[in-house]
Amino acid sequence: MCGIVGAVAERNVEAILLEGLRRLEYRGYDSAGMAVVSPQGALQRRRAVGKVAALAECLGDAPLPGRCGIAHTRWATHGRPSETNAHPHQSGEGLAVVHNGIIENHEALRRELVADGYRFDSETDTEVVAHLVARERGRHADLLAAVRHALARLEGAYALAVVSADDPGTIVGARKGSPLVVGVGIGEAFLGSDPLALLQVTDRFVYLEEGDVVRLSAGGRVEVFDAAGAAVKREVQTFEHGDGAASKGDYRHFMLKEIHEQPAVIAAALEGRLGERAALVESFGPEAEALFSRVRQVHIVACGTSYHAGMVARYWLERFAGVPVQVEVASEYRYRRVVVPEDTLFVTLSQSGETADTLAALRFARERGYLASLAICNVPGSSLVRESDLCLMTQAGPEIGVASTKAFTTQLTALMLLTLALGRVRDLAEETQAELVAALRGLPRLVERVLALDPQIEALSTAFAEKHHALFLGRGAHFPIALEGALKLKEISYIHAEAYPAGELKHGPLALVDSEMPVISVAPNDELLDKLKSNLQEVRARGGELFVFADERVGIEEAEGIRVLHLPHVHEALAPILYTLPLQLLSYHVAVLKGTDVDQPRNLAKSVTVE
Ligand code: AGP
């Protein structure tokens, strides 16, 4: 989704803004732009369709000197990707705005502003903000007051940054529904959609809250005002992961780097959360023990990959903690007349903590009488974390590749911890708890062993590069893993892929199976193995080519039309985590063979901050 950078510094800001945009590329975008107030007090703008590199080229030809500026990567919502629709949007020659989110009442505002004599150049919803602020600037003493009055007219979601030639050395930012952070420098101040954009200049951040308006001015002055307009102090937090998190290191792609980080980040997700023979319930917060002992139902809500993690958790929570679980995609849940049984725990899962639908679902749930809300999230300080009663951070570190990998396996790790915590307060046998704790401790080592199979997985990928479709099969808790495998292949290789619980095959999808349809199956050593083997025979009998990731102990061997990769034996409850890895690597290698943009696949955004 759109990315925002802003800087008021003691030096020219063009390079800071450009580097910030490069660091936001992972969010997904189709055009980029920048506006800077020059030393002479004139506002100048450059915009380009396509990658940030195209904007850089344009700036190479016509630089933007000046110590105060804003920049943006646009992910088209209103109006196609074009230079005219790219941000910043201006009102006249003196005022520019960048925006992330959607202004829902833009049509009515546009009519009003046109009637007032304002000329519109773009098809975007954002341009109304530029004209509204400009109109208010004519009525008020400074940019801050003008922005505040303009905000009062906006419906929808926004993170905004505004500069004006009449207020040199000042940026006014605002957030409502879309993320915005302030980077605190020495004698300088910055704005960014996330801290990663600004790590080249600072590691100290203020996470703005809903309704906050901020004014950055010369000398690094930062003034925050809450939704009611009162000056407030917000905590300055230090970013823990270091700047290396935003670079690929020796890897060809962020996705590959993030796949290979999984042993370390799974270990980090477990760090300090396991006792000798049980999970530490207090990892979920001091009130967790009292709350968890009251839980009689769990509702899990998430989107995309995070939703798949929730689907796996349903199997775990029902089996080990004995609680009924509902799992639903946030975009459906938020518009349903949900019936909430007494003492239901509401759980959201999100890498970013800013996904618009998940956030809206949480806000909807807060009005529905849940026992409490728990966020399992990867981004500290994100909206989801701040607005939930309890949280457990997944500790995966920044995930830059659009295709979620380490965020998923750490979510699963966190969900197993939740299963153990709820199981503990609900009398899960101590032996079972101890067994799962021991298995969790051994998991990072097993993940390393699966990663060592990468050359064999890469060899398998050649069979997919020319295919147009693929079918993924799994049973039980591995059905969501099949769904996740299909999603990974779709999003980065653009090969159409579907996933089915293997038992559903003969109820329809078997009709698709022929020699052109590769069928990928995960076959851990669990109670459904024999049934899965029969399903695989059904595929072979129709000439389908099978690719099976199987436990080394299950006795599935290669034969004509069946390629088998053996995975190390793992406690069957944790197999969904381990079996995710070969599917991630397979998709990655297929995408590389196909030459797609692995880290920023077409049409997709990393953090979906609009509905
Ligand atoms: C998965 O590879 C995608 N990036 C996408 O499905 C993602 O999981 C979804 O948009 C939810 O994002 P979140 O975890 O940040 O809420």
Image: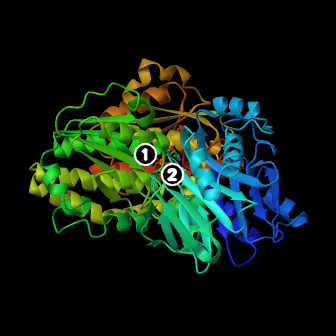
Task: Report if residue 478 is visible in the image.
Answer: no
Locate residue 272 relative to residue 20 in the image: left or right: left
Tag 2–tag 1 contact (CB < 8 Å): yes
At 80% from the left and 53% from the top, the residue drawn is 47
Image x and y of residue 525, in percent = 31, 46
Crowdedness of circle 2 by 10 Å Cα count: few (<14), some, many (20+)?
Answer: many
Numbered label attached to residue 404: 2
Residue, disc 1? 306
At 68% from the left and 51% from the top, the residue drawn is 137
Whether residue 220 is situated above or below residue 473 in the rendered picture: below
Q: Residue furthest right?
A: 61
Mark before the other along the chain sequence, 2 or 1: 1
Image x and y of residue 90, in percent = 76, 49
Numbered label attached to residue 535: none
Whether residue 224 is situated above or below residue 345 in the rendered picture: below
Front position in the image: 180 or 496: 180
At label 2, which amino acid type do we have? Answer: Ser
Locate residue 343 relative to residue 215 in the image: left or right: left
Q: How many marks?
A: 2
Q: Quadrant of residue 20?
A: bottom right
Q: Tell me: is circle 1 under 8 Å from ligand 1.
A: yes
